[in-house]
Image: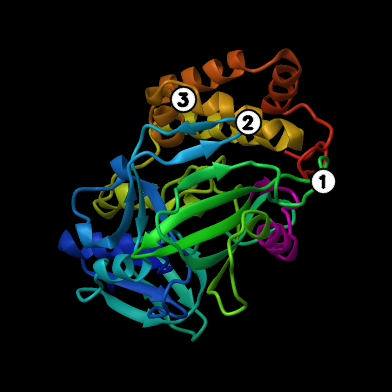
Amino acid sequence: MSADLIVCGLGPAGRALAHRAAVHGLAVTAIDPHPWRRWPATYATWADELPDWLPPRVVAATVERPLARGTREVEIDRAYQVFGTAALQDALDLSGVRVIADRVLDIERGERVRLASGRILTARRVVDARGLARDARRAEQTAYGIVLHRDREPAVFMDWSRDNGAGADAPASFLYTIPLGGDRVLFEETCLAGRPAIGLDELRRRLEHRLRCRGIEFGADAPVERVRFPVEGGRARDGVFGAAGGLLHPATGYSVGAALAAADAVATGRSLWPVSARLVFALRRAGLRALLALPPHELPAFFDAFFALPPDLQRAYLSGRTDPRGTAAAMTALFRALPWPLRRVLAAAAAGVPVAAATGVRAGQP
């Protein structure tokens, strides 16, 4: 065997795994076509999800009580942290890792990797952290954002206000406004999930319309962020880590915090998928089906009801990866808080019964 562990892919999940495995004394090989390329995306997570081993310098900004705006404004009673992307990447140090710039063609029997260069590597374990490939059959999250210099801009986790120029029956999007450190603020128009998702050109038009309506000036030279990734397609299984390995939350698109928190367990060979975690995974997939079935004009009220839940139930649904009882309790409480017409839509969708397309999703798809 050439290594104790081969990690395929060096995005946030793969790099965190390779880093922690090396810290635990394993002989690690990491493979990626562009292993030293800088990550372009902005990552954030709830503060209570971060592992203790991560140095404080990776956090660029902390929001103690972010806002959510549906039909009303509420404060979310949970601290939210935004990573400095370069600081996070650098903190996941690979100095003890053998890094190979190549493309993985195939993984055989969980211990043998075939590369595009023709090389074959072996290890006691191989973990695939290459992420999810795009597929027209999969729901995606899309977003278009710009970074502006603003003082004292309130951080808003979701803003469903109807000032983005979209029609009442158009697929819905919300504004995500978060600090990046210093006086930099990211304004991002986001399609939470859609099959197909809203295109980036349309999101750009909506974002610019919003900013003009609010008197926020922006120029053509403002830094831009473009986001597009699947929110379904991952499977609850060992040997695959990160979004493709079931760690992406299908109702939010978040996976980095979960991957950081789970990196030590995977590095030391523990399974992430006891029965409790598999049950939560199934419940979250049902939640995504329900979310995709909602009529766009009902989304603000839906999230009003969610953020009115007790904080422990919000945490259970958003972060309780091995807490099926808490996840089910949160879903049940949310269901009971909604009006009967929405309950019928959600119940049918969660059960897998075809529902009329509402949010850009094709009716009847899983």
> Would residue 206 be counted in the magenta stretch?
yes
Q: Quickly name the residue at label 2.
A: 71
**Residue 184 visible in the current orientation:** yes
Q: Quadrant of the N terminus?
A: bottom left
**Residue 111 visible in the current orientation:** no
Q: Nearer the viewer, mark 2 or mark 3?
A: 2
Q: 60 or 239, which is in the foreground?
A: 60
Q: What is the span of residues highlighted in magenta in the rendered image?
A: 191-209
Q: CA distance from mark 1 to mark 3?
A: 34 Å
Q: CA distance from mark 2 to mark 1?
A: 17 Å
Kindly indicate whether the residue at mark 3 contacts the one at mark 2 (C-beta within 8 angstroms): no
Q: Quadrant of the C terminus?
A: top right
Q: Quickly name the residue at label 1.
A: 167
Q: Quadrant of residue 64?
A: top left
Measured as percent of width and height from the top left, residue 92 is found at 27, 66
Structural crowding at the residue carrying mark 1, measured as other residues with C-alpha within 10 Å and reported as few (<14), some (14–19) or many (≥20): few
Residue at the outermost front position: 215
Measured as percent of width and height from the top left, residue 74 is found at 48, 31
Q: Quickly name the residue at label 3.
A: 327
Q: Residue flagged by tag 2: what amino acid is it?
A: Thr
